[in-house]
Amino acid sequence: MALNLDAIGKNLGPVSKEYTWKDVVLYALGVGAGFSDLDYCYEKNLKVIPTFSIAAIFDFLSHYASNANINLAGILHGEQDLIFHQPIPTEGTLTTQGKITHMYDKGEKKGALIVGESDTWHANGKKLFTSIISLFSRLDGGFGGEAAPKETFAFPDRTPDFEIQEIPSLDQPLLYRLSGDVFALHVDQEFAKMAGFEKPIMHGLCTYGYSCRALMNSLTPGAPEKVRRLKCRFSRPLYPGDPIKIQIWKTSDNKAVWKTVNAKTGEDVITNGIFEFGEIPKKEIRFDGQVAVITGAGGGLGRVYALELAKRGAKVVVNDLGGARDGSGGGSATPAQKVVEEIAALGGEAVANYDNVATAEGGENIIQAAVDAFGKVDILINNAGILRDKSFVKMEPENWKAVLDVHLNGAYHVTRPAFTLMRKNGFGRIVMTTSAAGLYGNFGQTNYSAAKMGLVGLMNTLKLEGKKYNIKVNTVAPIAASRLTEDIMPPELFEKMKPEFVSPLVLFLCSEECEENGNIYNAGMGFFNRAAVVTGPGTTVGDGENPPDIETVVDKFDTIQSLENGKVYFELNEQVGDAMNAFNAPAASEQDTSSKKISSAAEIFAAMPDAFNPDAAGGVDVVFQYHISGPGGGDWSCAIKDGACAISKGTHENPTCTLKMADTDFIDMISGVLPAMQAYTSGKLKIEGDIMKSQLIEKLFKLT
Ligand code: NAI
């Protein structure tokens, strides 16, 4: 069995795992927490021990071994490094993706080192931690690979600053294994003996958890969120009940080195430990070197966007015509000029522009002003706006047109020349300004609502045209006190409704960090949420060959208009695709399941002779005994000798190894739903006898 070197760099996952507060507490108990550190064991104000993370992604770890084709009989956890980006929430779903980054060769009979790196995200969208794991494979050395780089590590030449004593109980592995690692080595007497130990040993990661508690209690008491990194090398096994000492040397304000010693023998169990701690470094969002154009920035929301962008390093074009609230009047240079002066007083850089967004020429001039002053445009906020409210019957064409000209046509006029430059530069962030009046409706604002919804349509398509140039287009629906809203907002709300409550979201949408594209956000008074066009799952009516009649459509109307389980499409093709597949989809999926479905273990054994690959059986002489439990189970043996395979119902008197599994898990494993390695490490597959020989099964049979 050779290592699969092609596995290096191949993406593994995503693998998702749901957990609740009970899993968090179970882990804490498994690593020795109790009443003395109740914060980790009581759901009231529960805190999560950071190393819970590695137990929570244990299923993912098995992918490294199975993809690298490691010989399981010689596998050991070599090193573990956990880097924490955010505190671990007390419940949720974790999604992990990773890859094998290196396979190092220590030499024939000396083993190999397989290094895997993964990132894990919480369903809340935050990246929580990075895990770098080294698996030491005792039996896979000598494959001709490069040697692992040498690392130097030294402990300070003084007594430790902290020394914490712990005595894991004799039964500790029985509790710890419930957090995910149910490998027989930690529970099964015979298995442990076969692996060369006098009895089941502690999980290395359990001792790692004990060490993490000791480090936190010494250096970040009560503040698990301050743990930034925990790295170590597992050097010797530990038996349950043996006392340990965690020795810690603080080497700087936010770093310590540590090791865990078997207090009975004095030997290092874990060594080369690094512990880093401190506040989560906040990455400041900056706009240095970027050029932002904001229309209608002489007052209200636009002014605040301009100031905030300039404070964070952007060079700003402050556009404002300086007209009246309804857009009437010749305009004035004063509002835009004042904002430029405010920016200059803060030490920022800005120029004023007084062009009218409502004309194509005005739009060109605004962007030209940016090019003339700063050479480019990276950010555009289409913000200029006027109001001409009237009930629909009184809405004369002039008022209709004036509002559409500023909001919708204005965005077109300015965005078109900006977009051309952004495409050339391969970067752009554009924000449209819609309104709740457009998204949801508001009496007396048909012109305004139509224009504001028009901007959403403009965004929907522009996001597609800008995608490959790294141009992201998003839309904000603000709520803020300004000249536009002064007569409809109660004065006592004005302070709560400052534009400053909207600008953080808008600035994020303008930033390089923003990967969102084509989204709409409501923002105001410190409250933010996303709005979207949601499409219900719908239903087919009729046979798809002949147009259905009205009455049948009416009969199904409840289903047609239901938004339950609705989705948000990113582009037209997705919706059209669903419509075109509506009649085919169910039939296709039925076909799928019927062709693949295996219903019993007997079926699998009946198919085994055909799935046998005699070319892989040269020199093989083994008997696999299967003990499949459950209603669809039974005993079967499979004898392979002289390139032939014989399957018999019942038990063989002298099997090479016995595989025990529940019928449903066995079906999942053979169908490819449950990877064999995961089945084994999760305890769903138990193997007795010669484990190494059991690894031949995947080579000898091609069942899926
Ligand atoms: P504002 O009246 O304080 O700001 C709008 C600015 O646009 C004014 O300074 C005005 O001179 C300028 N402007 C008008 N027509 C222009 C033109 N043709 N060319 C260049 N500049 C022009 O109002 P506010 O509240 O700051 O509004 C900003 C944007 O937010 C507008 O698009 C508005 O429709 C939108 N909005 C505001 C809400 C709020 O609660 N304040 C609610 C929903 C949307």
Image (cartoon, rainbow, N blue to C red):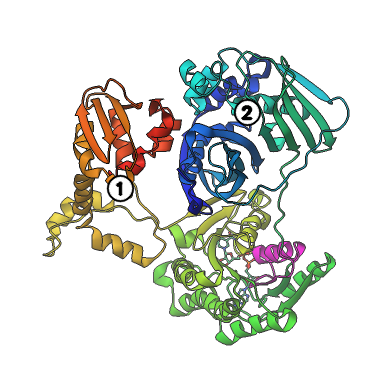
Could you tell me which residue is drawn at 26 percent across and 43 percent down? 612
Q: Amino acid at mark 2?
A: Lys
Mark 2 packing: few (<14 Cα in 10 Å), some, or many (20+)?
many
Is 210 placed above or below 415 here?
Answer: above
Q: Is residue 86 above or below residue 692?
A: below
Outermost residue toward the right in this view: 158
Residue at x 59%, y 23% (from the top left corner): 28
Residue bearing the label numbered 1: 615
Query: Depth-wise, is mark 1 or mark 2 nearer the camera?
Result: 1
Residue 222 percent coordinates (x, y): 71, 27
- Residue identified by numbered label 2: 47
The residue stretch that appears in magenta: 287-313
Q: Is residue 349 highlighted in magenta?
A: no
Q: Quadrant of ligand 1?
A: bottom right
Task: Say if the magenta span includes residue 305.
Answer: yes
**Circle 1 Cα neighbour tier, 10 Å, few/some/many (<14 / 14–19 / ≥20):** few
